[in-house]
Amino acid sequence: MTKVSVVLYYWVLVVATLLFAKTAGLAENNEAIIKILVVVTILYVGVVMISHSKGKALEEKRGREEQKTPSFRGNKSKKKHK
């Protein structure tokens, strides 16, 4: 995920959470709203960090596999047809 998409998804999550909290009656005062936002932010940062580390590990694994497999692209001999 790019940095722009991480920020955009965060704000979409915040808006959706606040709408849900208001509808469910959980956001009765400012203190409750702040607590909800802190919890959602911590959870989102954790999920983004975990997905980033998994993506990085996957890229490293693919890079190691590409280094192990030899490339035979330029070793083909050409046959002349009459």
Image (spheres, rainbow, N blue to C red):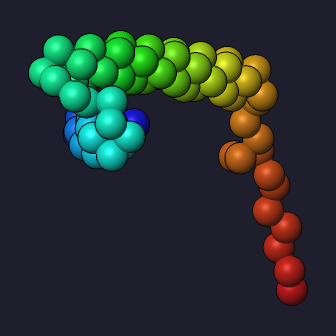
| Left or right, 81 with reference to 16 | right
Residue at the left extreme? 30
Name the residue at 25% across, 30% down. 27
Quarter where residue 65 is shown: top right
* Image coordinates for residue 2, horizontal then vertical, percent: 32, 37
| Left or right, 34 with reference to 1 | left
Name the residue at 72% across, 36% down. 71
Quarter where residue 54 is shown: top right
Q: Is residue 71 visible?
A: yes
* Image coordinates for residue 75, horizontal then vertical, percent: 76, 44
Q: Quadrant of the C terminus?
A: bottom right
**14 is higher (above) or lower (below) than 49:** below
| Left or right, 30 with reference to 82 | left
Name the residue at 30% across, 21% down. 36
**42 is higher (above) or lower (below) than 79:** above
Name the residue at 69% across, 46% down. 74
Q: Quadrant of the N terminus?
A: top left
| Left or right, 12 with reference to 70 | left
